[in-house]
Amino acid sequence: MSEWIRVLKNGIYKDNPVFRQILGICSSLAVTNLLANSLVMGVGLMFVTAFSSFTVSLLRTMTPKHIRMMVQTLIISAYVIMLDIFLKAYMPSMSKALGPYVGLIITNCIIMGRAEAFAQKNKPLISFFDGLIMGLGYTLVLLVIAFFRELLGFGSLFGIQVLGDQWVNWTLMIMPPGAFFMLGIVIWVSYRLFPHEDDKSQGKAGAKA
Amino acid sequence: MAKKKQILYPVLFMIILTVVYTFLLAFINESSADIIQRQQEIRVQRSVLYTLGLIDSTDAALSDTEIQQLFDASIAVKEDTSGTYGTYYAYLKDGTPAGYVFPFTGNGLWGSISGYIAFSPAVDTILGIDFTSHSETPGLGGRIDEAWFKEQFRGLSVSGDNPIVYRPSEGGNVDAITGATLTSNSVSAIVNQMIKETQTFAEGAAL
């Protein structure tokens, strides 16, 4: 059981993929101008990471070591295509809003990172859980960034206007530079909140399975 | 099993895995193709109905079946044999044409802007306009999606070389978007071009 709790802690803050491992940055910059987009992107990534970690783990004893990267890429891309088809069929407006970023989930380093660092060495169920939690860690950071970007940039939350008419939208927040500022602030705040043991010894954060 | 570098096993493994996933994806793709196509058709129908003012907005709270019924009851799909527009739509009110809807595509600031525009039968009035895809800056040029901007084009009578002129220029009839001059200019250029083309088309095709 302690193993599961450790995975949970790692994914959410200790080894959070975005602010600790600095993975998946491109997409967290791109889709965070609206909360709804970030939520769908995050849930999509949770789905892909969880299932690809599960499958990679399931096949880990059978997979020849030197072709494992190919196998992982194949598995990940299959789940990404499934997600893309699902969004097109059942959430067309969301599919349009996320545009090419759904297909680009495959390039999200978090998924391959987890497949390599965790699923390759652990049992299927815990790998599935690890993928899910890493995805959740990513989603939470996205939502925090999107919360501020949408609030300051559009004066709304999930599309509902919360700041009155007198609010002047900060256009900067909706544009890509706004995401850089927010991400920087989030990483800074999170380093203050969750100091890492390794930080003292100048060790590189993350990168341990 | 495959600890040493072998040739046959990895190749077979990869082939089997690829075949399994290809079949799985092909199956999912096949079973959802109809739904996806239907979603796209509904999206077009919503745009066409909106430009003609038959629904309040493209997000109007009508189910897909209701949209389909409304569309079937009032719109005739036409094919342009000359190939300028491909498919266009005629709005029939009590059997007589009350408007035509044409698709358009033009250059915006960052990428192409496409949508639908509705004209009166004589092509002297814009009935409405809708943008279906664009890549303008969110919050600036992206505001062409907002109702206040699109509604300005409703019932605008068009004549002369450049019918769309932004206020406060002389003869201005539409407000541009603050902070999005280039997008606004692109839209007026696209619409003006579209008006000219459609007027020529209407003369030739006798709508």
Image: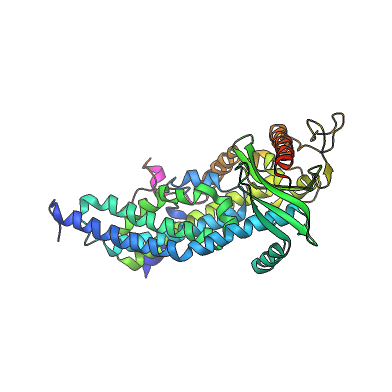
Q: Quadrant of the C terminus of chain A?
A: bottom left
- Taking the image as shown, residue A85 lies to the left or right of residue B157, namely left
Q: Magenta part mainly helix, strand or loop?
A: helix
Percent x, y of residue A98: 55, 50
Percent x, y of residue B74: 73, 61
> In the image, is residue A185 part of the stretch drawn in magenta?
no
Above or below residue A28? Residue B167 is above
Q: Quadrant of the N terminus of chain A?
A: bottom left
Q: Residue at x 47, y 49 (%)?
A: A18
> In the image, is residue A198 part of the stretch drawn in magenta?
yes
Q: Residue at x 71, y 40 (%)?
A: B204
Viewer-side residue, A108 vs B49:
B49
Above or below residue B10? Residue A153 is above
Among the 4 quarters of the image, the one containing residue B206: top right
Above or below residue A68? Residue A128 is below
Viewer-side residue, B187 vs A170:
B187
**Total number of numbered labels?**
0
- Taking the image as shown, residue A134 lies to the left or right of residue B84, namely left
Viewer-side residue, B193 vs B16:
B193
Among the 4 quarters of the image, the one containing residue A179: top right
Q: Which residues are magenta?
A: A193-200
Q: Residue at x 66, y 56 (%)?
A: B77
